[in-house]
Image (cartoon, rainbow, N blue to C red):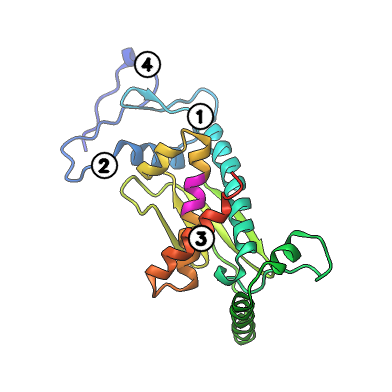
């Protein structure tokens, strides 16, 4: 590292130049790291990356937009899981009274005999599992300041969804410790978030993908079929 002598003509501030690096860094990754580590919102302080000023307000606006899309996607996925309790990896999906007029009871009446048997079997298995082990509260891993975290409750169970920055080369989505992570840096996410409908569909696609794998991680083909049905029912009214 070379420290240059002070130059009054350059004004206040510090210039850092990285050269002869042995590793290639994506500009997006460097930018996200800067958002995590420097106080961009304080007065009389600015950061420029390759002559581009980093604006914290832009990130806040983007995060709010992502939050709205997540809320819509979660609502649709939850409705799809309610319609298809046999596809849900969660313990119990509440049902309405036989004579009631609520959503759950309406869906219950449409179930075939085979679907009822599958659902009851899944419920019994999940109840047995619940008695053997204590409920674990999902712990979300270290996040950036712009992470979007939401909890979707299904009966007495549910899933935590976290959208954060994991780099352009990071996985599109993954599940860890009961938390579904979606990578906001992934090129497909970046492309789809420009249009609201595609943004919501993409988040729902990744949610149903991870939820379907939670149901049976050892059978990808069946997981794919479950995802297809959940995603269809999430948008069937459109």
Does residue 40 sit above or below 151 in this rendering?
above
> What label does residue 229 carry, if any?
3
**Depth check: 115 or 1 in front?**
115
Q: Are marks 3 and 4 in contact (CB under 8 Å)?
A: no
Pick whichever of labels 1 and 3 is earlier in the sequence.
1
Query: Dot 3: what SS?
Result: helix
Query: Dot 1: what SS?
Result: helix
Magenta-drawn segment: 201-205
Residue at horizontal 50 percent and vertical 46 percent from the top: 201
Pick whichever of labels 2 and 1 is earlier in the sequence.
2
Tell me if residue 145 can be seen. no
Does residue 114 sit above or below 180 in this rendering?
below
Q: Which residue is mark 2?
A: 25
Q: Is residue 219 magenta?
A: no
**Depth check: 149 or 51 in front?**
149
Q: Which residue is mark 4?
A: 11
Residue 158: quarter of image: bottom right
Q: CA distance from mark 3 to mark 4?
A: 61 Å
Q: CA distance from mark 2 to mark 4?
A: 29 Å
Q: CA distance from mark 3 to mark 2?
A: 39 Å
Q: CA distance from mark 1 to mark 3?
A: 37 Å
Pick whichever of labels 3 and 2 is earlier in the sequence.
2
Q: Which residue is mark 1?
A: 58
Q: Are marks 2 and 4 in contact (CB under 8 Å)?
A: no
Residue at horizontal 31 percent and vertical 26 percent from the top: 50
- Mark 2 vs mark 4: give the one in front: 2
Does residue 206 sit above or below 87 in this rendering?
above
- In the visual, does 151 lie left or right of 45? right
Classify 10 Å Cα crowding around label 4: few (below 14), some (14-19), many (20 and above): few
């Amino acid at each position: 590292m070379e420290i240059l002598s002070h130059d009054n003509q350059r004004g206040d501030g510090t210039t850092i130049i990285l050269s002869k690096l042995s590793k290639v860094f994506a500009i997006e990754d460097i930018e996200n790291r800067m958002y995590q580590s420097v106080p961009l919102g304080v007065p009389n302080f600015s950061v420029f990356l390759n002559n581009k000023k980093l604006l914290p307000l832009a990130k806040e606006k983007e995060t709010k937009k992502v939050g709205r899309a997540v809320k819509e996607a979660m609502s649709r996925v939850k409705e799809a899981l309610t319609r298809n309790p046999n596809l849900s990896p969660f313990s119990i999906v509440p049902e309405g009274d036989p004579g009631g007029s609520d959503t759950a009871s309406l869906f219950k009446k449409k179930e075939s005999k085979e679907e009822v048997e599958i659902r009851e079997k899944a419920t019994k298995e999940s109840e047995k599992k619940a008695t053997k082990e204590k409920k674990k509260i999902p712990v979300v891993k270290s996040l950036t300041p712009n992470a979007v975290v939401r909890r979707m409750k299904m009966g007495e169970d549910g899933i935590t969804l976290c959208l954060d920055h994991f780099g352009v080369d990071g996985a599109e989505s993954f599940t860890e410790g009961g938390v579904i992570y979606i990578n906001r840096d992934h090129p497909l996410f970046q492309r789809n978030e420009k249009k609201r409908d595609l943004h919501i569909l993409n988040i729902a696609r990744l949610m149903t993908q991870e939820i379907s794998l939670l149901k049976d991680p050892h059978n990808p083909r069946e997981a794919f079929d479950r995802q297809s049905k959940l995603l269809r029912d999430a948008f069937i009214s459109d």
